[in-house]
Image (cartoon, rainbow, N blue to C red):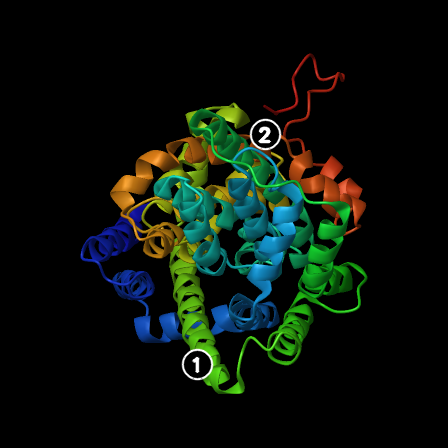
Amino acid sequence: MGLVALILVAVFVLLLVMNVPIAVAIALATFVAVLSEGSDPAVVVASNMANGVNSFALLAIPFFILSGHLMGKGGMARRLIDFAGTLVGFLPGGLAYVNTLTCMLFGSISGSAAAAVSSVGGFMIPEMNRKGYNREFNVAVTTTAATTGLLIPPSNIMIVYSVAAGSVSIAAMFMAGVLPGILSGLFIMGVCGWFALRNRYVREARSSVRDIAIAFKRAFLSLFLIVIVIGGILAGIFTATEAAAIAVVYAFLLSVVVYREIKMKELPRILLDTGITTAVVMLLIGASSGMSWIMTMANIPQTVSAALLGLSDNPVVILLTINVLLLCVGTFMDMTPAVLIFTPIFLPVVTSLGMNEVHFGIIMIANLCIGLCTPPVGTCLFIGCGVGQTTIAKVTRTMLPFFGAMAAALLVITYVPAASLWLPVQTRQMKKADVEKCTFMRPAADDDTDGAAVPGP
């Protein structure tokens, strides 16, 4: 890869070991690498950072962050909990199912795993503790279930991937994440059922049809946001960025005017929190854009691609290798920089295998979701332990079966392309021909090539 690539990797790893913030580490490593390459680092890094954030699609991120803050503090979580309780609370260990389903619903509205852990966990973890559920189990359920919100749209990380990949439709990504998100939630529920039967957790009283109708009526306005955002995008009424702005207006009216859970005097603090979060995300995107430029100049993506393709001629093995590498990355790097840095590296590899770009985006997000629940930098794990008033050491052992469930869901998402691509095709966010021309996971067809098989797992 050359001296420039070696310097880039060495400086970046050294800065991470020194506990330098990830955005600063990316920018400084890029600066040093550009300097060694002979260019003017100030001009190159600054121009690439500016170009990296100069995207209309990225405007959706601050809007979705703001709407997530409004929803988290606006009383929506409590209404979703009540609705989920009427649907699945009667099962053995019913509160664990309620917790998981609520995180899925809340994630589909807010698009934030951290907000789901704090908002849903803030009520569900104490309630489950009071009903005799194991404290570490309660934290593990909330922490892992909250990550489903990053797959079920809307999702900021899907927007980041779309920008990093270059030409991927945000609407197609949104649709592609629905079934994988539900699948991950069902796998987590399966582990909840196993724990419930083993520990004989209690079940709640079965709700009547009238109770379900009342709970649905209370949660309807919150759930209707999904219809507005996703329906508007699919109908072509507005873009994903415009949908994010509409989500802010709707969340504001619901939280401040209808539910009256947020006072006007609280809005400056919410706007400040949104600004801080947005600044961090944009700094990461800008710094990663500079790193992507120097990686391209140093031929790092091409070198890694050749190495992986030379490792094996079996796409199943290559995809498994990429998943293992991403799992390792997720344990020490947050999702946003991981997507920005590794998308340009791995995307050429998988597209050469015939994999669709949208499918790989869902694989990458599902993979890195696991990293949000693992030490040492698992954001959701830290928040969950704080809400549940326990330690990471105690929770980690309980989370092992949940890690297994998430890994199993990841394998299904990886090797069953239809799980990600069926819905975008049905909603016409992707052309069927674009999916059919991909050879990944397609059996070799008989032809006149002297028995040569079409590459495929």
Residue at x 68% of width, y 21% of height: 443
Task: Report whether 130 appears left or right of 362.
Answer: left
User: Which numbered tag is attached to residue 269?
Assistant: 1
- Image location (x, y in percent) of residue 170: 65, 58
Quarter of the image with the N terminus is: top left
Task: Report whether 449 appears left or right of 192.
Answer: right
Q: Is residue 372 above or below residue 189?
A: below
Contact between marks 2 and 1 (CB within 8 A): the answer is no
- Image location (x, y in percent) of residue 149: 55, 52
Q: Amino acid at mark 2?
A: Tyr
- Image location (x, y in percent) of residue 439: 67, 31
Q: Residue furthest front?
A: 205
Q: CA distance from mark 2 to mark 1?
A: 44 Å
Front of the two marks 2 and 1: 1
Q: Residues within 10 Å of mark 2 (few under 14, many from 20)?
A: some
Q: Amino acid at mark 1?
A: Arg
Q: Residues within 10 Å of mark 1 (few under 14, many from 20)?
A: few
